């Protein structure tokens, strides 16, 4: 069983924010709190499987993110390489055996996310645990940026990115990835809804 002190959670806030007109998404307010800070607080409130440490991946406005009180690390890869760049940064900086990744734009992420992903490692052959949630049609869809992984995957991800790889699914397909469904009746249907535009963000505040 994974112990709480063995997990570091990273909030991914290093994107371009192109669908928000270039705004720094993690600093946009959700119910009066910057998205990245709101996400960080959700991680700090995790039930069952507590998280031992926290950090943020950001590429702009580093001082604003540092004000949230946890370490902030920019991508080591150039030109906004996407979430996988954040994964790589997290694995390089992580000082615990496991890294949990979450995006900054999903402010209703489950409070039992860490606990349920950690159960996938009850099977010693698991290399990555990835969340999945139902679409409107009821079909499960994987949520690739919500992953729990051991830091031992750093070498694999370094090689993949050096080869030019940038797609999360293409990398996780190289490993035994266990999909963890979040489809219980009590699960929030909007837990994994990501706000890509300011209009979507404001709409989510009202639901």
Image (cartoon, rainbow, N blue to C red):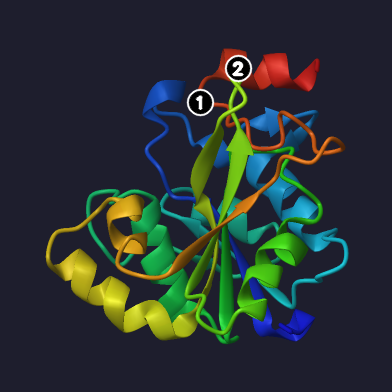
Q: Quadrant of the C terminus?
A: top right
The local crowd at label 2, few if under 14, some if 14 to 19, many if 20 or more residues have their Cα within 10 Å, is few
- The residue labelled by disc 2 is 200
Residue 76 x/y as whole percent: 30, 67
Which residue carries the number 1 mark? Answer: 196
Q: Nearer the viewer, residue 45 or 33?
A: 45
The answer to whether 6 appears left or right of 81 in the picture is right
**Viewer-closest of 128 and 203:** 128
Disc 1 element: loop
Q: Quadrant of the N terminus?
A: bottom right
Left/right of residue 175 with respect to residue 205 in the rendered view = left
Residue 25 relative to residue 40: left or right: left
Count of labels shown? 2
- Corner quadrant of residue 137: top right
Residue at the image position 77 percent from the left and 80 percent from the top: 4
For the residues labelled 2 and 1, the Cα–Cα distance comes to 7 Å
Q: What is the x, y in percent for residue 136?
A: 61, 19
Camera-side residue of 141 and 198: 141
123 vs 46, left or right, is left
Looking at the picture, tell me which residue is in the foreground, 86 or 186: 186
Position above or below: 152 against 198: below
Which residue shows up at 33% across the image and 60% down it? 173
Q: Estimate the x, y position of residue 133 in percent, counting from the top left.
A: 62, 39
Q: Is residue 27 visible?
A: no
Decide if residue 37 is in sight here: yes
Please provide percent x and percent y for residue 199.
59, 13
The reply to whether discs 2 and 1 touch (Cβ–Cβ < 8 Å) is yes
| Depicted 16 relative to depicted 130: above or below | above
Determine the image quadrant of residue 122.
Answer: bottom right
């Amino acid at each position: 069983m994974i112990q709480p002190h063995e997990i570091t959670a990273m909030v991914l806030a290093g994107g371009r924010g192109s669908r928000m007109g270039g705004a720094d998404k993690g600093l946009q307010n959700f119910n009066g709190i910057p998205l990245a800070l709101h996400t960080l607080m959700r991680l700090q409130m995790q039930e069952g499987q507590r998280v031992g440490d926290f950090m943020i991946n950001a590429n702009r406005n580093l001082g604003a993110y540092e004000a949230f009180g946890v370490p902030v690390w920019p991508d080591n890869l150039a030109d906004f390489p996407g979430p996988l760049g954040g994964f790589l940064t997290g694995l390089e900086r992580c000082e615990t055996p496991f890294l949990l990744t979450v995006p900054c734009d999903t402010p209703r992420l489950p409070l039992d996310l860490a606990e349920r992903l950690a159960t996938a490692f009850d099977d010693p052959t698991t290399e990555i645990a990835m969340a999945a949630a139902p679409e409107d049609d009821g079909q499960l869809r994987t949520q690739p940026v919500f992953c729990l992984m051991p830091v031992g995957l750093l070498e694999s991800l370094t090689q993949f990115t050096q080869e030019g790889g940038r797609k999360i699914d293409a990398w996780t397909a190289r490993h035994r990835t266990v999909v963890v469904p979040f489809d219980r009746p009590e699960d929030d249907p909007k837990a994994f809804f990501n706000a890509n535009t300011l209009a979507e963000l404001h709409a989510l505040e009202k639901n």
